[in-house]
Image: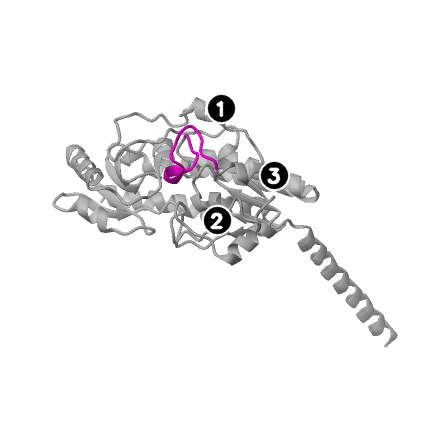
Amino acid sequence: MRFLSHSLTVASSLTAAMLASSALSAEAAPKVIASIVPVHALVAGVMDGVGSPDLLLSGQTSEHQASYSPQQIQALGEADLVFIIGHGLELKLDELSGSEAVKGRTFFELADVDGLSKLPIRQGGAFEEHVHHEGDDHDEEGKKEAGHGEHDHEEAGQAEDGHDEHEHGKAAFDPHLWLDPVNAQVMVAAIAGQLSKADPANAERYAANAAALGKGLGGLSEELAKELEPLKNKPFVVYHDAYQYFEARFGLSAAGSISDLSGNEPSAQRLKEVRDKLKAVNAVCVFREPQFSDKAAKTVIEGTSARDGVLDPLGSGLSPGKDAYGVLLRGLAKNLKSCLAG
């Protein structure tokens, strides 16, 4: 009886110690927010075993046009670290920079990380003919702009280089950087670095997770290159110009975009321009997006032999988590293959 009592006491003590340890671990994990599903996936992968980031935007609405609820603004104000792409991608975040709720908070812009491959913003609905070389440094000047590192987001809302802030924020380059898995590898290393600064006690875990994740992204890039190889010379049209990095990495042939970089409603002139290009190159497919009306895509396709497909750069239907990035890119490849090879 005395042995049983002693055992129960020891068990209770161990349970209490484990609960206390768990509470300390949970308390030690920084409160982190990621803006969009693919960024959230990369952050979740680096934080695996330490904590879980919160997701700001589910992807049901375009990141360029999303508005934020009072609850989301409050969460941003309470976060230790917020990971965004930046440079005008999450356009409405710029408007929050002067809010008391987020004043003084650090928004880490992944677009500012050194080593990213950056591409210039394409103009017009019909793209110029060009050749992409896989793995090339697509924009050396763009890289030189990177490396600003961690800075207050209040500065991020300011327009630069004479671009229209309402068109694409301050980006002097296409900000859809995450759709190149090699860029994602660079982002993962930067995410680990920022998390380690905020939470030095878990720095080794962040570094190990980042190394494993980076290796997996390298394998993903090789996998997709093989899968997409047969599609290289098949022209297609996209709804909004979000896929340039995916095209460049895998040598795909987008002929134009119905809408612009920010997904704004296309003008009649732009629709005509895209429709003329579609006919001229005999584009195989026109891809719409779940975040936008399909009316314009139907207008462009009408009376042509082009097929209808769907691409989603945000992963609006995906379950958030560390696996979502790979699911997103494989989904793009699958949908491209289904329409272009059909």
User: Magenta span has 311?
Assistant: no
Residue 235 drawn at (x, y percent): 23, 35
Q: Is residue 60 left or right of residue 152?
A: left
Please state, as top left, top right, bottom left or bottom right, where the N terminus lies in the image: bottom right
Which one is earlier in the sequence, the residue at label 3 or at label 1? 1
Q: In which quarter of the image is residue 333?
A: top left
Instruction: Kindly report the secondary structure that dominates the magenta region of the rendered protein.
Output: loop
The amino acid at mark 2 is Asp
Q: CA separation, marks 3 and 1?
A: 21 Å
Of tags 3 and 1, the one toward the viewer is: 1
Residue situated furthest right in the rendering: 2
- Callout 2 crowding tier (Cα within 10 Å): few <14, some 14–19, many ≥20: some
State if disc 2 and disc 3 touch (CB < 8 Å): no
- Callout 3 crowding tier (Cα within 10 Å): few <14, some 14–19, many ≥20: some
Identify the residue at image location x=28%, y=25%: 130
The amino acid at mark 1 is Lys
Can see residue 341?
A: no
Q: Give the range drawn in magenta.
A: 158-172
Please state, as top left, top right, bottom left or bottom right, where the C terminus lies in the image: top left
In terms of secondary structure, where does tag 1 sit? Answer: helix
Identify the residue at image location x=32%, y=52%: 290
Residue holding disc 1: 144
Can see residue 168?
A: yes
Q: How many marks?
A: 3
Identify the residue at image location x=35%, y=44%: 332
Residue holding disc 3: 194
Residue holding disc 2: 323
